[in-house]
Amino acid sequence: MRKTARYSALAAAGLLALSSLTACANDAAGTASSGSKGDGKGTKVKIMVGGLDKVIYLPAMLTQRLGYFDAEGLDVELLSEPAGVQAETALVSGQVQGAVGFYDHTLDLQVKGKHVESVVQFSHAPGEVEIVSTKKADDITSPKDFKGKKLGVTGLGSSTDFLTKYLAVKNGVKVSEFTPVAVGAGPTFISALQQGAIDGGMTTDPTVANILAKKAGKVLLDMRTPAGSQAALGGPYPSSSLYMQTDWVNAHKDTVQKMVNAFVKTLKWMSTHSASEIADKMPADYSQGNKVLYASAIESTLPMFTDDGVMPKNGPETVEKVLKAFNPAVQKADVDLDKTYTTEFVDKVAD
């Protein structure tokens, strides 16, 4: 397993560059990203990503940059929204054919009568970090201290919202006893933390790296590794994935297979290359000329990724347990986990 980056070793002179990295990456994520156009004759697919700049969703852009969509004869357009819940909305409304976001949305949507399934699983841990403001570090030493606090999430109804509620309930704090605040990620999250609009919150890299470098917050819970997921959630937590509407999957199996082929090839490539090599493949404006700092942000999150796209054993059960802890609709529902994901396409990927 790769070692987590040691942010304390970052040179003070690099702090400004890291701040620029996060800000620029978020600006880039707010616009559409043209996919692997090739000669324009490939099969057209639009994918909405819950934040293209987020390291947890890195396989989307990396697959494009490595040319694997082109190699499969696909014309992929990557689009971006700041939160996974917005990517979900774009999918169910038919604006896009696929969404790169957390697997837990497939369960949430099934309860709401929407049939969506993960077709390739990028991860076996959330990749999320619960950060507390440096000023509140003495007051918040565990989720038991969430009561009465304002906690940042990317968006209401997002996966960070789900996980925050679970951590609270698991530790004896009712959902009604704390206030979730939608602050997005990157500069908006950091600003909210520094200005006291939130006491803490859940976010991912490169936002985590920026906060630690600025000494604006401290890590309360680290779920960027399988071990961290086990400790906080009681099992593997499949998060980042490509999920699609089941009817569309069944009607376009050849296209879905090509998508899965490309993503699995990327996951295998990631498993045999360093964070620095991965950073080298990403858009230049993601690193702002300082790939060492960007590579540090990538390095800390790499342990969350699978190398084969396979749903981790007992992963769906962990996600269901998390959602049932606080969501009355899921508690009352008879969720059919077999319909929230498929291994059909991953099983057919050539070695």
Image: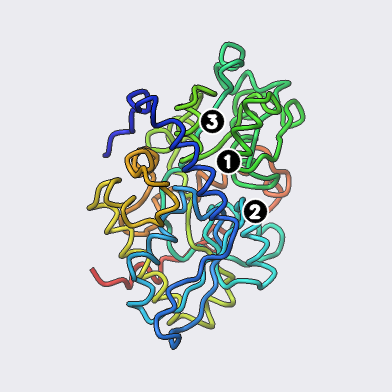
Nearer the observer, 73 or 105:
73
Label 1 vs 3, first from the N-terminus? 3
What residue type is disc 1 on? Answer: Val
Which percent across, then down, holds residue 84? Answer: 60, 53
Label 2 vs 3, first from the N-terminus? 2
Q: CA distance from mark 2 to mark 3?
A: 19 Å
Label 1 vs 2, first from the N-terminus? 2
Residue 303 seen by the camera: no
What residue is pinned by disc 1?
322
SS at mark 2? helix
Which mark is drawn over residue 85?
Answer: 2
Q: CA distance from mark 1 to mark 3?
A: 16 Å
Which class describes the residues within 10 Å of circle 2: few (<14), some (14-19), or many (20+)?
A: many
Residue 214 relative to residue 67: left or right: right
What residue type is disc 2 on? Answer: Val
CB atoms of marks 1 and 3 within 8 Å:
no
Query: Which of the two discs, 1 and 2, sits closer to the camera?
Result: 2
Which percent across, then down, holds residue 56? Answer: 46, 48
Residue 173 seen by the camera: yes
What residue type is disc 3 on? Answer: Glu
Q: Where is residue 298, by image quadrant?
A: top left
What residue is pinned by disc 3?
130
Residue at the outermost top position: 138
